[in-house]
Amino acid sequence: MNYSQEEMCLIALQHTPVGAWRGIDKLLEHYGTALALWTHLQDPGVLEQLGEKTAHHLLSIREKGLDSLLSALDRVGAQAVTSASEEFPSRLQSLSDPPRVLFFRGKIPSGRCPAVAVIGARRDTRYGRNQAYRIARELAENGVVIVSGLARGIDTAAHSGALDAGGITVAVLGNGISSVYPPENRDLCERLIASGGAVISEYAPDSDPLGFHFPIRNRLISGLSDALLLIEAQRKSGTASTVHHALSQGKEIFALPGNVDAPGSELPLQLLREGAHLCISGQDILQEMSWDRKEKQLSLFDPPSADKGTGEATDPVLEALRLESKTFEELSEELRMSPQELGARLTMLELEGTIERLGGRTYTLSTGRSPF
């Protein structure tokens, strides 16, 4: 990608810590252009506004030459786009505080593509993981871009669901583009890029995943989307900040209902009480957003299909688990089956993927073909 001098200077100025961003904004307003500011880095007013450490950091970049920044991006296969560029995501232009520069790997989807942010807790539950995967997959099968944060838990499940559908997904990072956090998602990150999606960050490429980066990052997750789906989260959580950003940006809000006594149901149930759209399948979002859609996929409350061999809906074990999960002992008593007979039946159903085993020999119906 070719960059103008103004763009190169903006890219260089983005190599400052978050605490200096407001100072950069004021200086850009004062000098008029990034190029003018770049040539006046040693002015007393610049030192006063940014502080000596930040100003000296920028001066060291200037001494090395701006081409060194491009070389660093090339080494990790990344590019940069400024807010004035035609390639800059159109949805972010309307934010009250759009990023000046975005660093990215892959291909940023067109603003014409429908997009949904799927978010939730890092400390998720099996239920939350499975539903995030299932709904994201269904949306991706219908041409919807899935936006999330590449974090552990719900983010990982949402990205995976979109990829397994052959769809496109975008990850917005809370660290620099040069590394992947958490590190166990490196393969997911590469798969995401190879599948036509993008990994995006407004932080300098070598920035660490600092805690305060993520709430700032969250406005971009909602900003890149037409709607937001909350899977599970507690009221006081980092996920809540993404919801607040989405509300302030005028996005449609969807929430997945969960067990009323589960901590992760606190925020979804609160949003549902306050008027969020209830979502139990991707079709709920497709219909509410008036997006073109395919035939309805397997919904949360559909019984397992009859083509799974012995995992048909009339199986007594499946019937016993239809409304809620149960322990081995509860199933044995209800079905009047010997431990040996029940154990063999449960093992077969697990192998077929029709049921799942939770902790403490508790069993539940499988809610979809989730790899989790």
Image (cartoon, grey):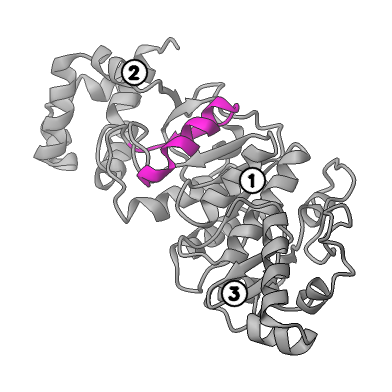
Q: Which residue is mark 1?
A: 161
Give yes or no for contact between labels 2 and 3 (Cβ–Cβ under 8 Å): no
What span is in magenta? 182-203
Q: Which residue is mark 3?
A: 265
Looking at this view, is 225 or 286 the one in front?
A: 286
Q: Residue 213 appears at what percent x and percent y?
A: 35, 50
Quarter holding the C terminus is: bottom right
Q: Amino acid at mark 1?
A: Gly
Q: Residues within 10 Å of mark 1 (few under 14, many from 20)?
A: many
Q: Is residue 266 magenta?
A: no
Q: Secondary structure at mark 1?
A: helix
- Specify whether 351 is left or right of 248: right
Task: Name the mark nearer the viewer: 2 or 3.
Answer: 3
Q: Which mark is residue 335?
A: none
- Specify whether 177 is left or right of 69: right
Q: Amino acid at mark 2?
A: Met
Task: Name the mark nearer the viewer: 1 or 2.
Answer: 1
Q: Residue 295 appears at what percent x and percent y?
A: 90, 45
Q: Which mark is residue 8?
A: 2
| First along the sequence among labels 2 and 3 | 2
Q: CA distance from mark 3 to mark 1?
A: 21 Å
